Amino acid sequence: MQSIKLSELSHHYDQKVVVSGFVENIRNLQWVQFLVLNDGTGKVQVTIEKSDESNQEMISVVNSLTLESTVKITGVLKENSKVKLNGMEIIPSILEVTSHSEEELPFSYRDLTGVNFDTRLDYRFIDLRNEKNSLIFKIQSSLVQYMREYLYQRDFMEIHTPKLIGTASESGSDVFEVKYFDRLAYLAQSPQFYKQMAMSSGFNRIFEVGPAFRAENSNTSRHATEYTCFDVEFSYIDSYYDVMKLESEMLTYALEKVNHIYGERIKDVYGVELVVPTLPFPVMKLCDVYQELESRYGYKVEESEKDDLTTEAEKLCHQLSKDKFQHEFLFVTHYPASKRAFYHMRDNEGVLQGYDLLWRGVEITTGAQREHRYEEITKNAQEKGLTKDVEFYLQFFKYGCPPHGGFGLGVDRLTMLLLGISSIKEVQFLFRGPNRIEP
């Protein structure tokens, strides 16, 4: 018989079942032994009567059993209203220890109060046994699933681009060097160049979910040196507003699905209300944002800082969007070209054809219509001092390339904002930062 997930046991009353899991609790009383098993989907009580002669071997095993060992149980599932744990119990006939916990845990994962966070990260495999922590990744997985689903329904194709590249990508800085046989290679900051290669290949609609690497010595609560990026690119657009429309629809679709499955649990466990956004998302020019922040909240910055959003301005945009539009999201447009990558398109007046998307006061996306004309993108690269490093990339546009655009979303940051968690370290399976490369 195959093991049954504990979350599905209620369909098997009075049947023989096989279950497996961690031993979460042991109560060894005078006449009976109780085990509580946890397999990550649910919990169940196992009851062993000591007076039953046929149970003597199992009783002996339990006498030497340690917490957090794993076991496989064969028995009959019984409904029992006296059992506080889901009103059911398993009466076992076979108990097999599949692994033995050799030592006492370095901390209790059931109550992480006061546990040093670095210690938790050192023993992340134990930290993730905590139900609140493991739930993060179930929700994250669901979020990515439904963003994928939205795109698949619209004829997008998922691709997988290389993460080892021969030249420093994008800006040419903040990249990790890697020894590659007899030469240097680099870890990709994003799949941007290869997404655009797909457009020149005639793929038209593609996306990728994969790792990205930034060699920034940044120790903020929302940055990591390795993170998961959800990248989208598609052809035959008329403007960057097409890109904004697709992104807002994709996020609304995914958040609605996640809310249906996990909305109540998110509220109960993390104390956050998941508000499914309405369409369309509000849009403001960068200069108008600063005017509103000053007139509404008295926030002023030097003129020299108004070519980008400051961190404080980003935070205030959450309140601004709620007050002005009754919305948690805000598109900000009309950034100066000097603050964006050379492959972003500019109009005839030099205005950048792109945007940032803010959610709950944090930037989650930079998106744009890309420059697809060979002469223009070559000129833009030269203005940024990029020549040899992007020579291979410029080749993509020499033989015809349709108008296109796209965006990238950080899955970790998106999860952090969704659940109201203060640090990106908690929403990454294994965090990588300037001071952490293990486990």
Image: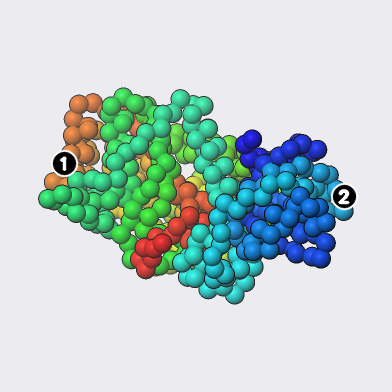
For this view, does 286 lie left or right of residue 298? left
Viewer-closest of 354 and 272: 272
Residue type of the residue flagged with mark 1: Glu
User: Is 136 rendered above or below residue 372?
Assistant: below
Residue type of the residue flagged with mark 2: Ser
Q: Position of residue 335 (x, y in %)?
A: 38, 50
Instruction: Using a 10 Å C-alpha cutoff, classify the residue at mark 1 as few (fewer than 14 neighbours), some (14 to 19) or many (20 or more).
Output: few
- Determine the residue positioned at 21% across, 39% down: 393
Check the image and name the residue furthest to the right: 81
- Determine the residue positioned at 23% across, 51% down: 186
Mark 1 and mark 2 residues within 8 Å of each other at the beta carbon: no
Task: Look at discs 1 and 2 and give the one toward the viewer.
Answer: 2
Q: Position of residue 354 (x, y in %)?
A: 39, 43
Q: Position of residue 18 (x, y in %)?
A: 67, 41
Q: Secondary structure at mark 1?
A: helix
For this view, does 311 lie left or right of residue 321? left
Viewer-closest of 169 and 349: 169
To which quarter of the image does residue 439 belong? bottom left
- Determine the residue positioned at 43% across, 66% down: 220
- Mark 1–mark 2 Cα distance, whole angstroms, equals 72 Å
- Determine the residue positioned at 33% across, 53% down: 213
User: Is 288 rendered above or below residue 406?
Assistant: below
Residue 330 in view of the camera: yes
Q: Secondary structure at mark 2?
A: loop
Query: Which residue, given by chain and number where applicable, does mark 2 sit on?
Result: 81
Query: Which residue, given by chain and number where applicable, does mark 1 sit on?
Result: 391
Nearer the N terminus, badge 1 or badge 2?
A: 2
Specify the color scheme: rainbow
For this view, does 302 lie left or right of residue 296? left
